[in-house]
Structure formats: structure tokens, C-alpha cells
Image: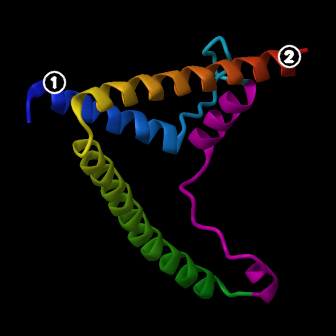
Amino acid sequence: MTLTRRFLSLLLAASVAIAVLGAGTAFTQDDKPTAKATQKAKQKKTRKAPRGRLPNHYGKLGLSKDQKTKIYGIQRTYRARLQDLQQQIEDLRQQETIEIQQALSDDQREQLVGLLKEAQERRAARRKARQAQSKN
């Protein structure tokens, strides 16, 4: 694969990943943290390490400290396993995208990059319009 083709493939994969996963931030149009984001950051610094959260309605069961500790441990175990699986899914989706792109001709890949860029610009324009509308 030539360097240009590899670059286009990676660019397209990154564009697709951004389009699929979105690029939400906690910043306003001026790229300054919002008051809520600043407050959350301060809370995170002053809070103790999170101990976990009981599943819905489990708090009403009168669980002992030992039971809560055991539940939190189970949650930590499964959370780590789920994160590993989610990473595997992301990797498979990226590999799928790359293989699909390899089925395209160079002209089609260039055209696709342009289409993705246009779609990204339209999303940005809609986002700006919504922000302007919410300020009024």
C-alpha cells in the first residue's frame, strides 16, 4: 500500500470514528469551561475515590457493609471486562472500515473523504446554529 493510500485510509478511519463516536465537549463556543464543568472538576478533586454505586433499588434492601463491598467488587470486575470488550469492538469497527476502504478505488476514497468533510462541516454549522438559538 502506498504512503498516500495508507494516509487516506487512516484519515478516513479517523473521520468515521469521529462521526460515529461524536466529539462532544464541555466547552462553550469560546472554548472556555462552563461553570458546571468547572464545578464538577473541583468536586472530583475534593471527593474520595469512588466506592461504587449500587444497582437500582438495591439501596432499599438494607444491605450490610460486607454485602455492599462485595457488590462493588463484582461491579469493578465486570466493568473492567466490559471495557476490554468495548475496546475490542472499537478495534473491529476500525479494521472493518479500513477493509471497506481498501475495496474502493483511489478516486472513490478521495470522493469519500470530501463527503465526510462536508458532513462534518454541516454538523458544525448546525451545532453553531443551535448554540446561537439557545443564547437568544
Q: Is residue 119 above or below residue 129?
A: below
* Callout 2 secondary element: helix
| Residue beneath disc 2 | 135
Task: Please tell me which residue lies in front, 84 or 108.
Answer: 108
- Quadrant housing residue 105: top left
Kindly identify the residue that appears in the image at 39 percent across and 30 percent down. 112
The outermost residue toward the left is 2
Q: Which residue does the image show at 54% across and 34% down from the upper left?
A: 23
**Magenta-span inclusion, residue 135:** no
* Residue 133 place in picture, x, y as percent: 85, 19
Instruction: Establish if 95 lies above or below 59.
Output: above
Residue 126: x percent and y percent?
Answer: 70, 23
Vertically, is 120 above or below 77? above
Q: Residues within 10 Å of mark 2 (few under 14, many from 20)?
A: few
Q: Quadrant of the C terminus?
A: top right
Q: Secondary structure at mark 1?
A: helix
Of mark 1 and mark 2, the one earlier in the sequence is 1
Q: Residues within 10 Å of mark 1 (few under 14, many from 20)?
A: few
Horizontal side of 91 relative to 76 (left or right) equals: left
State the mark number for residue 4.
1
Is 60 contained in the magenta span? yes
Which residues, given as a range, are shown in magenta?
35-62
> Mark 1: which amino acid?
Thr
What is the quadrant of residue 2 in the picture?
top left
Left or right: residue 5 versus residue 30 is left
Q: Tell me which residue sits at (53%, 84%) in the image.
A: 70
Residue at the extreme top: 30
User: Image quadrant of residue 45?
Assistant: top right
Q: How is the image coloured?
A: rainbow
